[in-house]
Image (tube, rainbow, N blue to C red):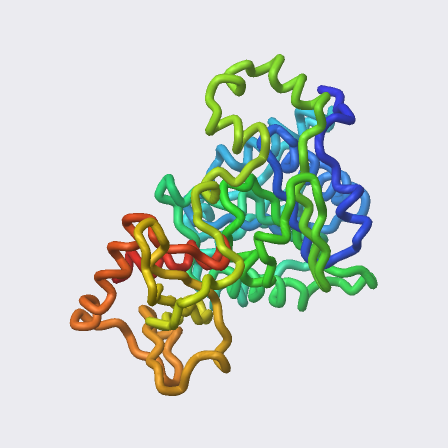
């Protein structure tokens, strides 16, 4: 059995806020997953038998490697219990896999991309905690978030909370991730502004708490001793070692709209309205466009909102047609030339999605 140290992450600080939704982002090597699977899952299960709901994004993520990594690289590595998970491999393709220990329910792994109807039918008694590990993806590697992902998560919480034994305590959800970017559906869902997040600090909302954990200097020294390669690849070091959102670094963020800009287009995407402002007095080197979120009240009743999905259609909106595309050519060119500024990080990523749909 390997002894645990006091250098890695633990949940004592974030649990002190007693919020329903608990989010931890940090560099790699902080041992968030290890701490969760031991302290919040296995040790608690041994005490009260409460089961764990473990979320993944895609059905294909459910495999023996995932399950055995929890069993052997975490539980059996740091305890002498010699745990042997019991599960059915044939259930992998269904996206719902139940795991037992000595015949007792321990964990359910659930894929978000299965049909909502199956999620609503997949009840689990005596649930203790919900976790979504690796909830932030690297979109530059071709990974994609699911359509309406946050709605799926909210639906899962409501479904499983309904069948939970009421012990007077909230059913907590934990989201764990590495900050490739500060844009993700969970932050959008909760209304968390990336501008309010800072490395080494904690952001508290009505029903959530976000901890952007900073590795201690002692832990950094230990990591460098074990893996000196961190010193040589600056980009990888910034993300994996320093915990910086490397995908967000070159985005032009301007919190306030510059002077002499006026609305040119309105887009509706993911149930949000983005106004694209045009520079009326362009000078060489200046940005041609500025993009920001606006409310439905701010959107002119005489202006059409363009969208790309039937789910975003509301009054005064229309799906973009082939004949509409030419209207946006100048905007697309400006995007390619990096002549567009954005109100925020999350605004940029939605506009990027708009760009690829035009």
Q: Residue at x 67, y 24 (%)?
A: 77
Which quarter of the figure is the N terminus placed in?
top right
Query: As rendered, which of 27 and 341 lies closer to the eye?
Result: 341
Q: Is residue 77 left or right of residue 357?
A: right
Q: Residue at x 53, y 20 (%)?
A: 230
Q: Is residue 39 left or right of residue 269?
A: right
Q: Is residue 258 left or right of residue 87?
A: left
Q: Residue at x 65, y 22 (%)?
A: 220
Query: As rendered, which of 170 and 27 lies closer to the eye?
Result: 27
Residue 254 in view: yes
Q: Residue at x 67, y 64 (%)?
A: 161
- The image quarter containing residue 283 is bottom left
Residue 207 percent location from the top left of the image: 71, 62
Residue 53 percent location from the top left of the image: 62, 51
Residue 62 in view: no
Q: Is residue 324 left or right of residue 191?
A: left
- The image quarter containing residue 20 is bottom right
Query: As rendered, which of 118 and 350 lies closer to the eye?
Result: 350
Query: As rendered, which of 1 and 277 lies closer to the eye?
Result: 277
- The image quarter containing residue 215 is top right
Which quarter of the figure is the C terminus placed in?
bottom left
Residue 157 percent location from the top left of the image: 62, 62
Q: How many marks?
A: 0
Residue 232 percent location from the top left of the image: 48, 17
């Amino acid at each position: 059995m390997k002894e645990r140290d006091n250098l890695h992450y633990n949940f004592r600080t974030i649990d002190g806020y007693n919020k329903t939704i608990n989010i931890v982002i940090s560099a790699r090597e902080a041992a968030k997953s290890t701490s969760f699977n031991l302290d919040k899952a296995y040790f608690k299960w041994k005490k009260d038998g409460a089961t764990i709901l473990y979320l993944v994004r895609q059905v294909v993520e459910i495999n023996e490697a995932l399950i055995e990594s929890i069993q052997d690289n975490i539980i059996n590595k740091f305890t002498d219990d010699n745990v042997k998970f019991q599960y059915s491999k044939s259930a992998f393709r269904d996206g719902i896999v139940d795991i037992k220990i000595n015949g007792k329910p321990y964990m359910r792994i659930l894929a978000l991309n299965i049909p909502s109807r199956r999620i609503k039918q997949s009840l689990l008694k005596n649930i203790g905690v919900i976790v979504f590990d690796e909830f932030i993806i690297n979109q530059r590697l071709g990974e994609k978030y699911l359509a309406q992902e946050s709605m799926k998560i909210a639906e899962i919480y409501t479904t499983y909370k309904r069948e939970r034994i009421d012990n007077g305590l909230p059913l907590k959800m934990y989201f764990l991730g590495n900050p490739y970017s500060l844009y993700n559906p969970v932050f959008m869902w909760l209304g968390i502004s990336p501008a309010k997040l800072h490395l080494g600090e904690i952001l508290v909302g009505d029903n959530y708490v976000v901890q952007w954990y900073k590795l201690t200097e002692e832990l950094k020294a230990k990591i460098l001793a074990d893996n000196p390669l961190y010193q040589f690849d600056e980009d990888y070091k910034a993300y994996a070692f320093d915990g910086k959102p490397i995908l967000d670094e070159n985005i032009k963020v301007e919190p306030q709209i510059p002077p002499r800009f006026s609305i040119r287009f309105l887009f509706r995407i993911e149930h949000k309205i983005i106004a694209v402002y045009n520079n009326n007095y362009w000078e060489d080197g200046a940005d041609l466009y500025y993009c920001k979120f606006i409310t439905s009240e701010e959107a002119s009743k005489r202006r059409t909102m363009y969208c790309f999905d039937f789910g975003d259609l509301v009054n005064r909106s229309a799906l973009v047609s082939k004949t509409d595309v030419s209207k946006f050519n100048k905007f697309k060119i400006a995007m390619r030339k990096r002549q567009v500024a954005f109100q925020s990080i999350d605004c940029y990523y939605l506009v990027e999605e708009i760009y690829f749909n035009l």
